[in-house]
Amino acid sequence: MQETIHNTRNFSIIAHINHGKSTLADRFLELTGAVEKRKMREQYLDQMELERERGITIKMQPVRMEYLSGSKQKFVLNLIDTPGHIDFSYEVSRALKAVEGAILLVDATQGIQAQTFSNAELAKSLGLAIIPVVNKIDLPSAKIKETKDEIIGLLNCKPEDILEVSAKTGEGMGKLLEEIIFKIPGPAFINDFKNKQALVFDFGYSAHRGVIAYIRAMKGKIKKGDELFLSQAKEKFVVQEVGFFRPELRETEILSEGDIGYVITNIKKPAIVHVGDTVTSFKNPLPPLSGYAQPKPVVFSGVYPDSQNDFSLLKHALERLHLSDTSLSFKEEGSGVLGRGFRCGFLGMLHLEIVMERLRREFNLKLIAALPSVVYLVFLKNGKKEEIYSPALFPEDFEIEKTFEPWIEIKIIAPHKSLSSLLKILQKREAIVGDIEQFTSQRVSLKAGLRLAEFMKNFFDEIKTASQGYASLGYKPIGSKEADVSRLDILLADERVPAFSRVVGKSQAQSEARELVGKLREFLPRALFAIKIQAKCHGRILAAASISALKKDVTGYLYGGDRTRKMKLWQKQKAGKKRLSERGKINIPHEVFLKMLK
């Protein structure tokens, strides 16, 4: 058997969103004395203001703790707290690659939820030691026995293997700490001091110190002054400082194998560094470790600065965010209406919302986000194949041979009584309903295939509303399927406005057309001539409306006399408005674009 480092334990906390991960991490920090009582606050490891406001974890956060066990042995506990929302599951996969064990936390009032399944499967696939824990046992609504039965069905474990805790009151926490030491193995001890090898699982950035690599040391020892090499980036650097997370950065002399810590590289080019890279010795390099599969964005949106003077600042901000969030992709693009900006790719709608909010807060940017879309694979009749990210660039129907769009498999766990409402929503969304199983005596588990484009249209909100907030939802990409979609264009005075184009399912084109025309009729200001609004799809007009011209009383100064004088003035006014409608240009105010994108 391979020898292990006996006094170190590396582990993560994984759970569905709002099941108590951050509160459990707080209790660990208190019990081990990692944070002084006067400095302690709720959600201590959630460093972002946005995380604390929303009550969710967005970025994983490592911390090193020291614990004196019941047998009076001193242990080092390296915890990586992870997010629970489905959009940030990539953060969870990165954390689990750097540890040997995981605490699977389940809320006793809610039981196993959709994300619990995917987290458990991920931990099992990596061969991690899993400690199942039932949380919130202090609440009157806790269903401890039912929750334990669900965990047994999920992990095939024994009832005595499941711990009961209250992260809020601290009940059961001492036993959990002892279980971590007993059940989670120590890191493998290679005993190779000549070679150096470490896996990069995250990054930070400092304007003065450059890239700060968060690493899990696999072989050898890393110290200040070492000449190291990033295998993937092909970049040499001299270590400026090494240290641990306490949870703030705390300098130390050496990072040894099995340790989780940081290395300050002084590399000032953040774009070249990648999560999953291998840090090794420059003079005696080892082969790269198996890192992480590059996450594929599924939602795309154009992001533009409110002022074109901020374009360079937006580019710098996106580069900074990409350093720690490699799932964010961006590429420069231009819009005739909104100017220069970036076509950005996200893992989901919450990911898009969080990135936009971070850009506004952390970099003080005023931004405009275009309507989110998915990527379509289009085979043209001329034999070419194109990936279309923007609705404005989607070809006309007569040019297309066939189109493919991304699909996802969704898993919904909900109360029995809401099943009929959920099925109506899925039918309306043209989902392909799969297995419906009895999950517990009160809940059902439902699987379905759904177009990703449909999932983006407030699907989660509809599911929550239909189940009075009790449903949980998980999803995963399942590839692409042939799509029956077309481009819906908006014409103003017979001219196409690309910024308002949408890609819609042909069966939904009529309702989408009416909705867009109605919105524009409401938002567009009146002009001196009548404005004709039309929605065009499949080569025909599906909906139309008009905005009447501003009127001026040209006969107001007349008094008495023959009516023919007024008639002449009215005819002259009518002819003038006709000339204006033929030659006049519609000026769409900036605010109208913003309202249409909401």
Image (spheres, rainbow, N blue to C red):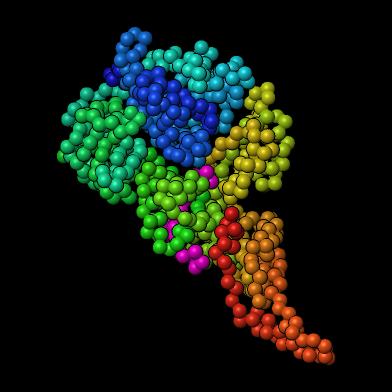
Please indicate whether residue 86 sits to the left or right of residue 485 in the image: left
Main SS, magenta residues: strand
Res 301 seen here? yes
Q: Position of residue 74 (x, y in %)?
A: 30, 15
Q: Nearer the viewer, residue 292 or 94?
A: 94
Q: Position of residue 110 (x, y in %)?
A: 60, 26
Residue 136 position by quadrant? top right
Residue at the image point whose x is 37% and y is 43% from the top: 324
| Residue range corresponding to the magenta coloring | 331-351
Please indicate whether residue 414 sits to the left or right of residue 355 in the image: right
Residue at the image point whose x is 52% and y is 63% from the top: 393
Residue 524 position by quadrant? bottom right
Count of residue discs: 0
Residue at the image point whose x is 28% and y is 20% from the top: 5
Residue 335 counted in the magenta span: yes
Q: Position of residue 234 (x, y in %)?
A: 25, 46
Residue at the image point whose x is 25% and y is 31% from the top: 251
Is residue 224 depicted above or below 130 in this figure?
Answer: below
- Quadrant of image for the C terminus: bottom right
Q: Nearer the viewer, residue 115 or 433?
A: 115
Residue 490 position by quadrant? bottom right
Q: Nearer the viewer, residue 560 or 252?
A: 560
Q: Position of residue 430 (x, y in %)?
A: 67, 47
Res 186 seen here? no
Q: Residue furthest top?
A: 71
- Quadrant of image for the N terminus: top left
Please indicate whether residue 417 sits to the left or right of residue 33 in the image: right
